[in-house]
Amino acid sequence: MAVNPQVMSNLLKVYFIMGSTNCQHAPEDVLRSAIKGGINLFQFREKGAGCLHGDEKESLAKRLQAICNESNIPFIVNDDIELALKINADGVHIGQEDEAADVVRRRIGSKILGVSVHNMNEAETAICQGADYLGIGPIYPTSTKNDAKPVQGLTFLKDLRSAAAHVPIVGIGGITSVNAPPIIEAGADGVSVITAISHAESPEESARQLYHAVNSVLKND
Ligand code: TZP
Ligand code: MG
């Protein structure tokens, strides 16, 4: 763990994830709009048919990182540790198919480390190996990730929260401002979304609604 868990929990409230293939307009414009609406954290996830590689990928990463920096939004890179180190990103997010979390932790030092987990075993391992937060999902059906695991609903999230009272947890998969509240009630610190913001007519308005949906539950704690 490199980041104070309370600080991490606050960053997870509205966690926007995207890459060029998720956007119907210029990714820079989508990100600027989402930041205006109140996102707390951003992950660059350049994946899927037609995604950028090499210099083009790095160039987009740097442009999006610069936009995040202007607003003090931490910039996380999905999977690509080399890129994260090269551009000095604030952190990385890895899945179970990527390098082991302890190896990644040694490579990135005190940067933020997020790990996707699907069961208690994976969660315990990720925490022991230095994860700052755990990603849980897909909570609801999603068509954004074609190799997504089966929909989990809220059961694992609730079990994980009971077992680990203070571990920062974020839900992912098919989340909108309408279905976000039960995820926070089940114990997540926040929600991560791709389509709900990237395809919204107004990413700003969508991010604002997600922020209110999450905070309306947290305030009642
Ligand atoms: N991991 C599990 S579901 C998912 C990822 C990356 C996709 C989430 O995208 P959306 O559009 O918010 O459902
Ligand atoms: Mg991965």
Image (cartoon, helix red, strand yellow):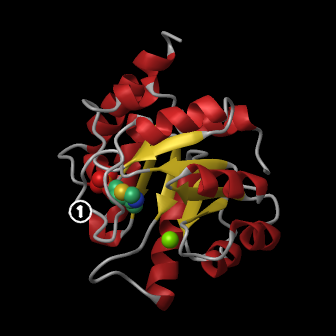
Q: Residue at x 41, y 39 (%)?
A: 36
Q: Residue at x 17, y 46 (%)?
A: 201
Q: Is residue 191 visible?
A: yes
Circle 1: is it few (<14), some (14-19), or many (20+) Cα within 10 Å? Answer: few
Q: Is residue 39 visible?
A: no
Answer above or below: position of 42 versus 5.
below
**Element assignment for label 1:** loop
Q: Residue at x 49, y 79 (%)?
A: 59
Which residue position holds label 1? 25
In the picture as drawn, the residue positioned furthest to the left comes out as 201
Cβ at disc 1 under 8 Å from ligand 1: no
Query: Residue 72 versus residue 89: which sits nearer the camera?
Result: 89
**Residue 120 placement, left or right of 145:** right
x and y percent of residue 218 in the render? 50, 19
**Residue 156 placement, left or right of 1:** left
Query: Residue 10 versus residue 73: which sits nearer the camera?
Result: 10
In the picture as drawn, the residue positioned furthest to the bottom comes out as 54
Query: Residue 206 versus residue 93: which sits nearer the camera?
Result: 93
Name the quadrant containing residue 28: bottom left
**Residue 152 placement, left or right of 115:** left
> How many numbered marks appear?
1
x and y percent of residue 153 in the render? 34, 41
Query: Residue 78 versus residue 151: which sits nearer the camera?
Result: 151
